[in-house]
Image: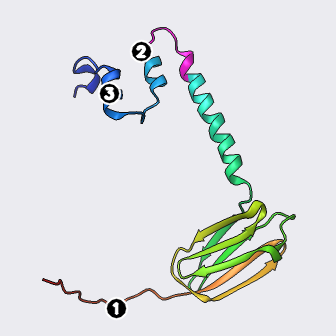
Amino acid sequence: MSSFFDSGPLPDWKVVQQWLGKDLPWKLVEQWDKPGDTDWLNQYVKNMMTHAKKDARVKSRGLVRMDVQKDKKFVTVTMHLDPNVDYRDLQLFAVSDRLRVTGLPNEGKQAVRFPCLVYARSGKAEMRKGQLIVRFKRRPPEKSEYELFIQP
């Protein structure tokens, strides 16, 4: 089987840029055609990873690690709080498919989706060893099948 690149000359990048607009990193495409200079790719990847690491640090501020566990009758959410977080500032809002937490540091808020539906009113929250544990009763899966009629 022949490769796409063996089938003929590649299109002019300027034409492709006009078709696609600014969706591609055009500086990368222009560097690709330069012979003998392979150091640019290493530098490009290094810059990309440096910016990604900075973005990850900015996004992680105020966020809390949440673990969700499901057993036969309950769904348990464990929030690992920093020692400087006062749990009295937190507010918990639950619906049948997710838990939303507000009052985190830096006016942060965070949500976690449950692996199954729960009864939101059954939620009980308590502090244990610096962790906030919220437990919900699982909602049984819907087993009824309903026939739906198409309207003419």
Which of pointers 1 and 3 lies earlier in the amino acid sequence? 3
Query: Which residues make up the magenta segment?
Result: 34-41
Residue 139 x/y as whole percent: 51, 88
Residue at the image position 57 percent from the left and 16 percent from the top: 39
Determine whether, in the image, residue 127 is placed left or right of residue 23.
Answer: right
Which of pointers 2 and 3 lies earlier in the amino acid sequence? 3
Residue 65 vs 21, above or below: the answer is below
- The residue under label 2 is 33
Residue 128 within the segment the image draws in magenta? no
**Label 1 secondary element:** loop
Q: Nearer the viewer, residue 91 or 40?
A: 91
What's the mark number on residue 77? none
- The residue under label 1 is 144
Q: Quadrant of the N terminus?
A: top left
**Label 3 secondary element:** helix
Residue at the image position 17 percent from the left and 83 percent from the top: 150
Q: Quadrant of residue 110?
A: bottom right
Determine whether, in the image, residue 73 is placed left or right of residue 107.
Answer: left
Badge 1, how many Cα within 10 Å: few under 14, some, many 20+? few
Residue 80 x/y as whole percent: 76, 67
Q: CA distance from mark 2 to mark 3?
A: 15 Å
Q: CA distance from mark 1 to mark 3?
A: 53 Å
Residue 82 vs 25, above or below: the answer is below
Residue 64 x/y as whole percent: 72, 63
- The residue under label 3 is 16
Q: Quadrant of residue 137?
A: bottom right
Residue 15 x/y as whole percent: 30, 24
Q: Quadrant of the C terminus?
A: bottom left
Magenta: main secondary structure: loop
Q: How is the image coloured?
A: rainbow
Badge 3, how many Cα within 10 Å: few under 14, some, many 20+? few
Determine whether, in the image, residue 49 is placed left or right of residue 28.
Answer: right
